[in-house]
Image (spheres, rainbow, N blue to C red):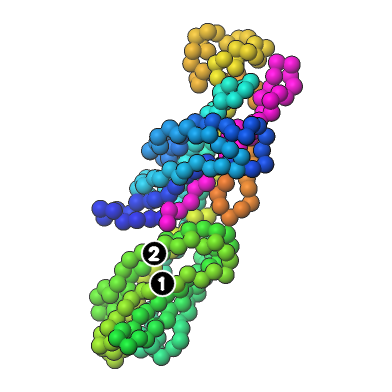
């Protein structure tokens, strides 16, 4: 998750998309209607995307749906909940709708680092390792260095990857001198793809005169305040419901003989209790947050017919660059 300051409030930016896996059954192209929702802790809808309708080939993906929401309401207890409604039309099972939900955890680490600027100028690099406070947290290692040029001194900072999986990181910082005056503050975003990756950026650039003045002070200590936020693994995932269309239900009288015409006029209120479908949820063990939804229809003779994987889609939630 990436955070951005807007009008004095921190808001969250992220994207959702659907992807049809390469190794799936069904026709080469499937038309899917889908919609994403961001849910509050009580299950109510905070924001809803427009309804998308696309043809998915095997291995194909939709374009990303971008969200910008306030983290205080959308990240209760550090968790993001997104629901996706998918509807597909093909062959015998004319319309099938699946409601899938996934929750992604977000961790934040805050810390202060006090160091001597004069000693930093003489040393090649300062290193600070922030040990985890609990077993489910990661080590955070920071490196500080100064690149001395003819007209200025550039203070650089590097964050060493110990995230173990691919993830996006938001790094907020503020640098103060010994008197408490702010020298620089800001935020940076980065995506770690591999383990042992190092991300570096320029923290501060000082003119030679200012750099020498700070280093010559008796109390030349600077304080770096940092906050590092990153996504963790999926903390919860489930299939809420799988529904079939009114026409498909009528063709399966042995399953729905007790359904009245009035009930069929409101399929989304009744199908939950009358549809016999097989479904399973599979969690992929990649670095990204993936959710795959599968289903099979039951024909009137009790055998599996036109076995299909609904949308064969996963919800990928990742941080905006």
Rendered-image quadrant of the C terminus: bottom left
Residue drawn at (48%, 61%), measured in percent from left and top? Answer: 191
Q: Mark 1 points at which residue?
A: 201
Task: Give the number of the disc on residue 259.
Answer: none
Q: Nearer the viewer, residue 258 or 53?
A: 53
The magenta stretch spans residue 308? yes
Q: Is residue 2 above or below residue 102?
A: below
Mark 2 residue crowding within 10 angstroms, few (<14) / some (14–19) / many (20+): some
Q: Name the residue under label 2.
A: 188
Q: Can residue 241 be seen in this view?
A: no
Count of number-bearing discs: 2
The magenta stretch spans residue 151? no
Main secondary-structure element of the magenta-colored stretch: loop
Question: Where, by quadrant of the figure, is residue 145 drawn?
Answer: bottom left
In this view, the residue farthest toward the top is 261
Residue drawn at (45%, 53%), measured in percent from left and top? Answer: 319
Q: In this view, does 70 lie to the left or right of 100?
A: left
Q: Is residue 28 above or below residue 1?
A: above
* Range drawn in magenta: 293-321
């Amino acid at each position: 998750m990436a955070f951005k300051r807007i009008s004095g409030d921190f808001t969250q930016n992220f994207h959702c998309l659907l992807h049809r896996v390469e190794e799936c059954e069904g026709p080469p192209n499937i038309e899917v209607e889908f919609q994403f929702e961001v849910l509050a802790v009580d299950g109510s809808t905070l924001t809803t995307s427009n309804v998308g309708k696309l043809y998915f080939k095997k291995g194909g993906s939709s374009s990303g749906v971008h969200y910008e929401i306030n983290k205080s309401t959308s990240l209760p207890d550090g968790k993001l909940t997104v629901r996706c409604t998918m509807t597909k039309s093909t062959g015998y099972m004319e319309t099938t709708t699946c409601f899938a939900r996934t929750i992604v955890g977000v961790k934040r680490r805050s810390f202060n680092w006090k160091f001597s600027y004069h000693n930093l100028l003489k040393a090649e690099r300062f290193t600070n390792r922030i040990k985890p406070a609990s077993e489910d947290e990661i080590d955070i290692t920071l490196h500080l260095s100064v690149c001395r040029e003819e007209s200025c001194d550039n203070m650089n900072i590097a964050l060493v990857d110990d995230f173990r999986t691919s993830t996006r990181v938001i790094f907020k910082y503020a640098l103060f001198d010994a008197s408490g005056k702010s020298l620089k503050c800001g935020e940076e975003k980065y995506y770690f793809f591999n383990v042992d990756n190092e991300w570096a950026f320029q923290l501060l650039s000082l003119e030679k005169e200012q750099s020498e003045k700070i280093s010559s002070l008796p109390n030349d200590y600077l304080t770096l305040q940092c906050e590092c936020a990153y996504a963790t693994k999926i903390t919860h995932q489930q299939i809420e419901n799988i529904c079939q269309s009114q026409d498909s239900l009528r063709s399966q009288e042995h399953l729905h003989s007790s359904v009245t015409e009035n009930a069929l006029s409101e399929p989304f209120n009744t199908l939950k209790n009358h549809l016999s479908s097989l479904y399973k949820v599979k969690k992929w063990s990649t670095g990204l947050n993936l959710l795959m939804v599968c289903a099979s229809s039951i024909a009137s003779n009790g055998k599996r017919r036109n076995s299909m994987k609904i949308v064969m889609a996963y919800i990928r939630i990742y941080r905006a660059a």
